[in-house]
């Protein structure tokens, strides 16, 4: 998944704890093998290769994720869209390459979540126009973290913290105290702008500092607005808290694209989801659920 994985847990037996951590790492590798757009033999690559010409049968896990992607797309009015990959693959952040205007215009014609058609009866997916391709990077790490937590619970672990890059899920507490999760300053490396005491919560942060380059005074980063094919510039980072990692990672992308006002309006309409947004001026914005005093 192109990111660092970290597991911290407590168990009375060291060997059992180490075995649980090994199971988590294997699950992360399994998901990477299945959902990577960079591995030619992954299930995702097979879909991208064939779905424009035929219905492609998929695993139940893939079907659930594709259905979830459609849900988040409809909920956000297209701010979340796995077909952004038609544009996203034109950027190379290490080589500092971006598409030319003509390339961008051509690729944008293949971006649209309605081009992905699911058939529940045959458990298959097809693309309704040529040029469409998908990338599940918008929430695959959150899904991986959720699966890891389920594995730990099945092994009797009740206190743990699993993270994959900017996506974490905490179980229980940390030796009688809440897990303390920091929100980093998007412009000052090593600095923290907020610290959140959490128990049994998922948290995801998306920032314009993760993969980016600056050219002609513009920051080009890996978070793409599906409507424009370009990087949004009204927000520096978004942190979302909810019950599961799939939701938090998806919403962190959604709010980043929608911006502070529309993004927070959407958050306030959802039960059990909160957010912290750092806008382009460096100001912090909190959803109302984080401002209510706790007993």
Image (cartoon, grey):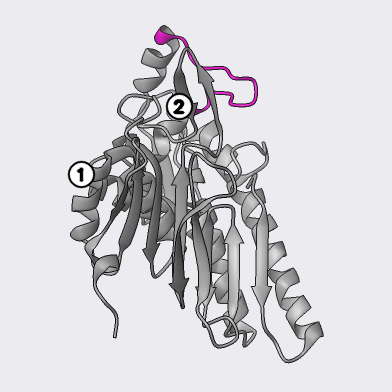
The residue at the point 53 percent across, 74 percent down is 179
- Which residue is under mark 1? 261
Residue 123 visible: no
Q: Which residues are magenta?
A: 86-101
Mark linked to residue 24: none
Confirm whether the magenta stretch covers residue 90: yes
**Which badge, 2 or 1, is on the more N-terminal residue?**
2
Confirm whether the magenta stretch covers residue 104: no
Does residue 83 sit above or below 103 in this rendering? below
Does residue 281 sit above or below 165 in this rendering? above
Q: Where on the picture, by quarter, is residue 15?
A: bottom right
Q: Out of 122 and 69, give the one closest to the viewer.
A: 69
Residue 229 image position (x, y, % from top left): 38, 24
- Which residue is under mark 2? 86
Does residue 10 sit above or below 101 in this rendering? below
Residue 92 visible: yes
Residue 256 image position (x, y, % from top left): 35, 42
- Could you say whether the residue bearing mark 2 is in a helix, strand or loop? helix
Residue 17 image position (x, y, % from top left): 74, 81
In the figure, is residue 278 to the left or right of 217? left
Residue 143 image position (x, y, % from top left): 50, 59
Magenta region's main secondary structure? loop
Mark 2–mark 1 distance (CA, rounded to whole Å): 28 Å
């Amino acid at each position: 998944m192109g990111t660092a994985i970290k597991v911290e847990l407590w168990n009375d037996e060291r060997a059992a704890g180490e075995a649980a951590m090994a199971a988590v790492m294997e699950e992360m590798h399994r998901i990477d093998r299945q959902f990577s757009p960079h591995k030619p033999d992954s299930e995702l690559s097979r879909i991208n290769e064939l779905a424009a010409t035929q219905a492609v049968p998929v695993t139940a896990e893939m079907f659930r994720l594709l259905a979830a992607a459609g849900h988040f797309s409809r909920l956000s009015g297209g701010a979340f869209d796995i077909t952004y990959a038609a544009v996203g693959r034109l950027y190379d952040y290490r080589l500092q390459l971006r598409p030319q205007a003509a390339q961008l215009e051509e690729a944008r014609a293949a971006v649209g979540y309605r081009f992905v058609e699911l058939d529940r009866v045959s458990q298959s997916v097809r693309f309704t126009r040529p040029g469409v391709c998908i990338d599940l990077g918008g929430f695959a790490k959150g899904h991986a973290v959720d699966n890891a937590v389920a594995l730990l619970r099945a092994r009797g672990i009740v206190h743990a913290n699993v993270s994959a890059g900017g996506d974490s899920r905490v179980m229980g507490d940390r030796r009688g105290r809440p897990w303390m999760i920091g929100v980093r300053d998007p412009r000052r490396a090593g600095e923290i702008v907020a610290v959140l005491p959490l128990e049994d919560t998922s948290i995801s942060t998306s920032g314009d500092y993760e993969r980016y380059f600056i050219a002609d005074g513009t920051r080009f980063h890996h978070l793409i607005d599906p409507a424009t094919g370009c990087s949004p510039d009204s927000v520096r980072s978004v942190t979302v808290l909810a019950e599961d990692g799939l939701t938090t990672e998806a919403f962190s992308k959604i709010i980043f694209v929608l911006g502070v006002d529309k993004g927070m309006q959407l958050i306030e309409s959802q039960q059990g989801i909160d957010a912290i947004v750092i806008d382009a001026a460096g100001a912090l914005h909190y959803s109302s659920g984080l401002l209510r005093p706790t007993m």
